[in-house]
Image: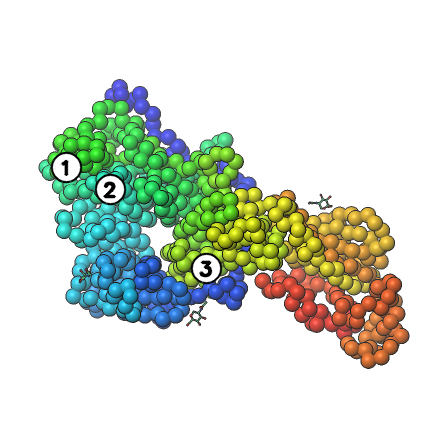
Amino acid sequence: MGRATAAAIIPGLALLWASALGDAAPSPPRLRLSFQELQARHGLRTFRLERACCYDALLVDEERGRLFVGAENHVASLSLDNISKRTRKLAWTAPVEWREECNWAGKDIGTECMNFVKLLHIYNHTHLLACGTGAFHPTCVFVEVGHRLEEPTLRLDLRSQEDGKGKSPYDPRHRAASVLVGEELYSGVAADLMGRDFTIFRSLGRRPSLRTEPHDSRWLNEPKFVKVFWIPESENPEDDKIYFFFQELAVEAAAALGRLTVSRVGQICRNDVGGQRSLVNKWTTFLKARLVCSVPGVEGDTHFDQLQDVFLMPSRDRRSPLLYAAFSTSSGLFQGSAVCAYSMNDVRRAFLGPFAHKEGPMHQWVSYQGRVPYPRPGMCPSKTFGTFSSTKDFPDDVIQFARNHPLMYNPVLPVGGRPLFLQVGAGYTFTQIVADRVAAADGHYDVLFVGTDAGTVLKVISVPKGSRPSSQGLLLEELHVFEDSAAVTSMQISSKRHQLYVASRSAVAQISLHRCAAHGRACAECCLARDPYCAWDGAACTRFQPSAKRRFRRQDVRNGDPSTLCSGDAARATPQEQKVLGVEGGSAFLECQPRSLQARVNWTFQRAGEQARTQVPAEGRAERTVQGLLLRGLRRADSGVYLCVAVEQGFTQPLRRLALHVLSAAQAERLVRVEEVAPPAPPGPKLWYRDFLQLVEPGGGGGGPSSLRMCRPPPVPGPQPPAPRRKGRNRRTHASESRAERGPRSAAHW
Ligand SMILES: *[C@@H]1O[C@H](CO)[C@@H](O)[C@H](O)[C@H]1NC(C)=O
Ligand SMILES: *[C@@H]1O[C@H](CO)[C@@H](O)[C@H](O)[C@H]1NC(C)=O
Ligand SMILES: *[C@@H]1O[C@H](CO)[C@@H](O)[C@H](O)[C@H]1NC(C)=O
């Protein structure tokens, strides 16, 4: 066929892994905050049911101030302000007969034949719609939650219990993706026990149910549904569309490439009622396009092919939200995840572009070059674009074309042509994503919260890069919101309350979107953090209020450059000198650890009695560890001042000044004798003790023993760094504690 050969073959499906990313190292977060630290200092709250797992459904209800949670055999209602407070829960189990049937079908009675609540939607002013797996017998029910101003209620309306087929999955391992529009539920789900009949389904409401063509791999090919959104297309509600996000096996891939996963965006019209003579009670406006998230490389693109989650960031124009999508790879060669952003205009452009076409089994998929019937398949019957008032009036050639051409030829490419943020070889993959738009001093920023399969949440800000419309993601925080490391299965955000809700198999966690004090106590640290929620107020790093007077608030999200913003605070940042003792031939550990994991540490040395400052070599007797500098085989000439500075984004910040005094063996011996005669607080003048002070501090007595820091060899001498400091401990407290712990008495041991 002439016109088919002229068309191009579907491009970009030959996947080349890692050629562009082969050497990429995972980027460390600026701050890593442990579960214990988040709980003790940053208001992390958790919720857990007794003897129930799998918190799969989260629903934020701002009006009632409740967070509804769907879990194994339960629905719970929690306070949005504090999920540990005023919780209510109700049991919703599967009947014994269903559980027995489930067990006869070969499923596990204890882990599969339960009612796993998968779906929660606000139905009307008084009720929620809840659907669960019902022990492989999907079922839905209305839950009475009361009016907004009433005391929170939670009651199952069991009379309303009805079939949940096509709404909830059968299998607890499967996800439910759905949206409730008016009284109608649009869902993407497997609608049979075997998990083979995948469908995009409309149910409830008054109109007849509608679905995709069954068992037609051109329509759906073993899909995994991720999210469903209702997005208006014009001012006219007749043009409203429902968008489905999923991954599936690529029908368009050459057989030689095997089973290849691709990510998709699909569309249908809200006013679709199916065809008249064919496609009866099936969608007539279903189209799908490939969603690409890849890194361009010389030898080919590296594709993140597995769509994990999509977040719709609303914009003032309801027709044009921004879509943030999290992807992972199915590659056995490397572990990677990425976040790509998509504009609705690009999605619509793909649906207005050429259709993909396959002439017959022996042909390849190409761009369709023939005549497309009118009205163009994918357009909704409406007065905006045509004269048809119902899909039942569509001409037969339109219906036939729609049935045979659900796939578009052009893919949807991400904004900027590449991922906004990616992480390769980090030991985890992305599973969930939500975002918040924040007003900062220099404009608006989108902050992404990315859940991982290791039970952590990454806080990433999207910062404009150069003059192009593209952005890059900066990893601000890695939050360990769970005690264990179970994968994040669901995430919801309340922008109004500045709270994030995170669910896993084992718990639900609530955490604020910001923890400004965690960035540090210096202006430079606050500024380098580039957290759009935070600013330096002259005394501390605190929450930035865009309405407050800006003059006193210092923040630079775009560049994170503290050199101009924080110049007046330089004096405050200069660390006090601390003294450290060492003994000839022994070793000394000079502790210095920046809060930021993205900072590099630079050590310089000024020998006692000399002016010149030299860099401490990174080899030989000096060994750098994450916690500081380990000096071995000490010599008298190592005495002097060691300055530790953190270098981050080109900005240098002094952290510690440590004056090391290396004693000769004989001096150390005398010191031990001092210890014997002079216990911690010397009551009277002691000759040896005074001598010693003069030795350490030429020119005078100075403070008592409490101003001295004695230094033992580090706990684990050798190549390993010393045991990590407990995270987040106040440095000052730590210093005084260690002084107390180590005390002068311990000097006797070495
Ligand atoms: C949340 O509620 C629990 C239980 O009432 C309480 O112990 C906790 O202090 C509250 N947390 C916050 C941050 O209000
Ligand atoms: C909400 O829907 C439920 C279930 O159909 C119904 O019983 C209830 O009366 C409805 N409430 C309102 C306020 O319409
Ligand atoms: C460390 O500091 C010294 C002196 O300020 C400077 O010459 C050197 O380039 C710095 N090294 C690094 C790696 O930043």
Residue type indicated by callout 1: Ser
- The colouring scheme, among rainbow, by chain, secondary structure or one colour, is rainbow
Where residue 668 sits in the image (x, y, percent)? Answer: 84, 68
- Residue found at x 32% / y 48%: 227
Specify the quadrant that holds the N terminus: top left
Mark 3 CB within 8 Å of ligand 1: no
- Residue found at x 25% / y 55%: 168
On the image, numbered disc 3 is attached to which residue?
512
Does the image show residue 27?
A: no
Does the image show residue 627?
A: yes
Q: Secondary structure at mark 1?
A: loop
Q: Is residue 519 above or below residue 648?
A: below
Compared across the picture, whether 725 is left or right of 328 comes to right
Q: Residue 389 has which mark?
A: 1
Q: Residue 240 has which mark?
A: 2
Name the quadrant containing residue 683: bottom right
Residue type indicated by callout 2: Asp
